[in-house]
Image (tube, coloured by chain):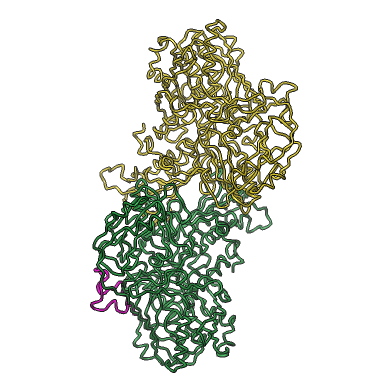
Chain colours: A green, B yellow
Amino acid sequence: MSDNYAVIGKSVPKIDGREKATGAAKYTGDLKFPNMLFGKILGSPYAHAKILSIDTSEAEKLPGVKAVITHKDVPTLKYGISPARWDENIFCSDKVRFVGDKVAAVACIDEETCYKALKLIKVEYEVLPAVLDPLHAMDEGAPQIHDEYPLNINTEIHQNFGDVDKAFAEAYYVRTDYFVGQRTYQAPIEPHSAVSIWQDNKLTIYSSTQSPHYFQHYIAREFGLKMGDVRIIKTYVGGGFGGKLEPTGLEFAGAVLSKLTGRPVKTFYDRHEMFAHNRGRHREYMEMTTGVDKNGKILGVYAKFIMDGGAYTSLGIASAYYAGALLTLTYEFENYKWDLHRVYTNLPACGAQRGHGAPQPKYAFESHLDNIAKELGIDPLEIRLRNCRRPNTVTANEFIINSCELKACLEKAGEISGWRAKKGNLPKGRGIGIATGSFVSGAGYPIYRTDLPQSAAMIKVAEDGSAATLYTGATDIGQGSDTILCQMAAEGMGYRYENMKIIAADTETTPHDFGAYSSRQTLMAGTACKLAGEEIKKQILDMASTMMSLTPDDLECRLGIISSKSRPMAKSITFEEAATRFFALRGPLLGRGVYVVPRLGGTFKGAVVGTSPAYSYCAQITEVQIDEETGEIDVREIWDVHDCGMVINPMQLHGQVHGALYMGMGESIWEEVKFDTQGKILNPNLGGYMLPTALDMPIIHSELVESYESAGPWGAKEVGEGATNPTMGCFSNAIFDAMGIRVNSLPLTFEKVWRALKEKREGITKD
Amino acid sequence: MSDNYAVIGKSVPKIDGREKATGAAKYTGDLKFPNMLFGKILGSPYAHAKILSIDTSEAEKLPGVKAVITHKDVPTLKYGISPARWDENIFCSDKVRFVGDKVAAVACIDEETCYKALKLIKVEYEVLPAVLDPLHAMDEGAPQIHDEYPLNINTEIHQNFGDVDKAFAEAYYVRTDYFVGQRTYQAPIEPHSAVSIWQDNKLTIYSSTQSPHYFQHYIAREFGLKMGDVRIIKTYVGGGFGGKLEPTGLEFAGAVLSKLTGRPVKTFYDRHEMFAHNRGRHREYMEMTTGVDKNGKILGVYAKFIMDGGAYTSLGIASAYYAGALLTLTYEFENYKWDLHRVYTNLPACGAQRGHGAPQPKYAFESHLDNIAKELGIDPLEIRLRNCRRPNTVTANEFIINSCELKACLEKAGEISGWRAKKGNLPKGRGIGIATGSFVSGAGYPIYRTDLPQSAAMIKVAEDGSAATLYTGATDIGQGSDTILCQMAAEGMGYRYENMKIIAADTETTPHDFGAYSSRQTLMAGTACKLAGEEIKKQILDMASTMMSLTPDDLECRLGIISSKSRPMAKSITFEEAATRFFALRGPLLGRGVYVVPRLGGTFKGAVVGTSPAYSYCAQITEVQIDEETGEIDVREIWDVHDCGMVINPMQLHGQVHGALYMGMGESIWEEVKFDTQGKILNPNLGGYMLPTALDMPIIHSELVESYESAGPWGAKEVGEGATNPTMGCFSNAIFDAMGIRVNSLPLTFEKVWRALKEKREGITKD
């Protein structure tokens, strides 16, 4: 398919590759401004405590301290990225709700002074009983974390489609399994930092952000500024993965410190603070009940979730919705019911992490489905083929699916992994597992203001046509969106990628875009860039038609060469020639494009939330070797076959898949944020939080099944998060295959595997 | 008049005022890049010499030296800002033509190593006879500087309008005077520097430039790159005054050094190098002959010029044309003839300096006219009133004059200075002088490619209408163009200045503009910004009309409030409301504007050069006190009355007038670049080159006579250079009035005045 195109479908080099590889790229932490101060936030030492008094006088006296602020110095308007639940303040006034909760901040001439000053702030606390266990947060008599939310219920969702009870009654086999997903953390290599400059009632913030737009909106709201008086500039970003989508204390406190001191203020999180403030993946308790016929066809599913939200909402409402709602994407069944509680606890708040709410329920369901397959004696690949979604279908919860090549993904994954030859024939300790995934290509409706188009783009062509500048608010956080958006703009224009320039993600210089989350940019920003490019091409062909004495309809422009369609041997002219003439006669050659989300299915009781214009699909197979003595898991190979529609840049696409698998693998086996009994993180560093290293990476086979997604530009849809979704389930199933026993909680650590094997040997476990 | 407007006509604060006042503004010299090298150019020690050999081997061996380049390492394509005379090479290959001429360059890890390395480059020269005196450069047998230009004639202009001989024959009085204008230097406070980054066949240069566009064009041409592969970014500029309009050795050598080393290279001129490379004002010999009737009415003028061009052309062809052509602007006469030679000498090249070719001929003519007035017994103000130009007239050399309030300027200057009471009645040693000036509002035709529009602009409105970003290639070099262009854009939009943002003078991110020279930006870039603003307003009113159920014609938008013209008491809506709706329904709100110069008069023998769409006018009066013992000149007061059409920003306008008077005063009394007998500058520093200081400034009265210029945006025209034009003549006349004797060469130094007084006392001089 990609042969039809001149620019897209090619692995062009990343537009910022050299800057990054040579170290020339400036991240927020690299920025220096004249007279810049450094700011740090004082965190609570207790998980739950009343603030009796705060005495900043000693800190203020320390030489080099330029400002000390508490709740008395900042707006008290509550904020949060989810407009349905604003529950956060810049600084705590009445009480603190987790270890690390924000109490005060300082601005000083250097970092060292900041740390000294923080120690001099005297806060008197009255320690309150804390609730750290989400399973008991809803108990009568449990400590109440927010007065406004009784029984610590932050979010409650109950959805019911079809008739699950009837389905279960008619089923050949009904099974219930119970799983736990752990709390993880995004671990971007670049910790979050911000430089705030508040001058003349205008606020400029350089920030490591996934969405300049949301930052601008919420910061303006908090300080009562117009959006136009708040400028957010994204610098290079060293990874976000969901943790840099919402403005944090860095930006809020930094802004106030800059306003008070009249100087630029750089605020930053140390690695251990990142763990407290980065809003990672929820700990989640999941009960899955499924009824199937004797062929393994799914008749109905009932899912029950309790999510540990931590002390604040963050993006948790959306995570909660995705947890239940996206479970219908990969398999076709008519009857679906789910109940979910997201509860407050006295732990750091959780939010979005690559895959958002989807990977853990997917882990649970894919494990659960394997259990069913085993019980019925059906091959795991086969049971998935029997149930897998077909294109142009509608889910139980009314999501409209256009393109869907899940069946082809499964078949190809089975083929390239040698599934049928291996399954049941592997040596002792070796196992192979399979799982499927699907993910949105952008949330259908943004977090606020549904009348705002999702993406806009503009293009300016240089006066001699030898370059074109794309202006987009879309946000490259390392995933490569700047590159593929330039490809799409150039394809739309009939131009060359090599001559594209890009200005991105600065609210002052680029048009609106919601930024990098929910895998939205390829489809949404991509469409805006395509349309802007096509508007340029239309004008160029119109000009060329007068120069060539041909009708515009007879002309095509490809890689900057304008030629006749009907007479391909006739003399062509260049884009440059037409652009030069255009500028001389008509002035600047500009194109604009805008992406407005179409009306989508998936309403529920009048509320429209979280569905998407398009869904990607993938099948994954993992082969592991278990050391039965030690429980050690040797990940040998992973096969991932992805349907992401038209591929804009194969190299980057495979890079996204590799990255997603890496993260999914880490969460499957090693990663977990752990707390002591007082709610303090035990491993807030990259020594104790066990990210995989390059040496832990298995052989990865990333393959594609192309499809054409009618809602996407040239048929493209998501790839950034999707491949994370099946991974944990896939590992669970491979380990299950290797050991014959199921570990029901993530991560599937060597220790858990060793214990499970030991219990099996000792006859404690069944299965 | 300015009461009709909401944004223009107001002294809004400068948009970059705070950045500059606080030191936060980054100039090119402030920039640092990872791995950046420093580059310096080796200059010739001789005014004229053959290069026999260059040995760079010792320099290359010095630790820290990363590259040493000579003519062998660079393109040999000749360049120059005037396409009619490309006579310059990046490095000399055959011979050097002035002390400082470029021979080689080094790139090193620090500045100190650069200086050491330059000393290690061994160049063998054969010294040639040099010609330093322009009066003898055209002599048969004079040393030949460029083989292609016999008799060292760089430019020769002969123009003849009407019949001067007949006019002289019919005149009551014909007089010839002879004057000399000195070589001066622009002396911007910021020396020129550049950072060049050549990577992947693309070249980015940060430069202290007056015209990113010309830099881009000529640098691309020199290196055979597409313009789109050359990006020029103007940083903050600390003054240009004509000296930063053309790319110099800094950019050319820096680019090659960056290409060879693969690293960013910062090249910079020390102050003494600025004197050699900055292309200041020409030394000029001027003979003026004028015939008048007995009432002092000018019947015809014959002017003869020899200009010392130095070793290269630079902008000297335009300076030469302006020298003769602009002499017709202020006074009406039918018969005009002029002959000019611009000659090569073995001195640094001369080019444009504030006022370009106009101030020295104006000095000569205004002195000359005073001599005539004295001879005829006519008051100097009176003779100017009798001859002064009226609006809607055509000059002898066919320039079309629209607005012209010179008469009102003269009357007002006479009135506010108390001319009639003072003239002839001042105490001994006190004198008062008068002169007039006029200047172009942009050169009608750019230096190259006459089919290219002069200016383009675009505006993007934020999605909620609370800010608007103006994109312009126009170049703020301290004169405040960013500020007034935002005012004009906001006025066009019906919006507020306070919410304007600007992106300017970066060839990649902003649309084309020719930059800051010939006082073109207010009229040309201003028109483009006005049109872009009006395109926004049209779209906003269209949207508002549907929101308000009124016709667009009935709506007006002023300072962001949209209201009905016919029913002013009806409910209004805000620009923000309409913009928000616009974005939701139609996407990004963009406006574009382009300024194309209209067809102008002023052709001469088929060639159309240098005329302008509009001309400013001014009258100036200066009062001085001469110490007859010492010759010391005490400048007491200056009155300047300017007709610059509609005033966009009065505070900035008066700032421009003050600055122009400051520079004109310096050139009148103190400033001169002096050479020894070998062609070496004697005073290449701010100690020896006598710029006036703040303490030397007199009381300045800057007043306005408003007019409406039909060719300008809202009637605006030039102010940046015009006030420099009368100043030297005005000083000459004031000193003449005070002493009764005429000093016929600039600068009118204390020493020259003292000598003139001494000669007068000793009876040597007449007058």
- Identify which residue is drawn at 60% across, 9% down: B169
What is the quadrant of the N terminus of chain A in the image? Answer: bottom right
Q: Which residues are magenta?
A: A134-160
Q: Is residue A146 magenta?
A: yes
Farthest residue in the top direction?
A: B763
**Magenta run includes residue B651:** no
Residue A308 vertical position relative to residue A763 in the rendered view, above or below: above
**Residue at figure coordinates x 59%, y 67% from the top left:** A2
In the rendered view, tell whether residue B127 sits above or below residue B631: below
| Residue B728 vs residue B452, the one in the foreground | B728
Residue B654 against residue A480 in the figure, above or below: above
| Residue A424: x %, y % from top left | 55, 90
**In this orientation, which residue lies closer to the viewer: B699 or A632?**
A632
Location of residue B245 (image quadrant): top right
The C terminus of chain A, quarter of image: bottom left
Left or right for A501, reference A568: left
- Answer yes or no: is residue A93 visible: yes
Q: Position of residue A764 (x, y in %)?
A: 42, 93
Residue B545 at least partly seen: no
Please state the horizontal and vertical placement of residue B544, each as a whole percent of the image: 35, 50
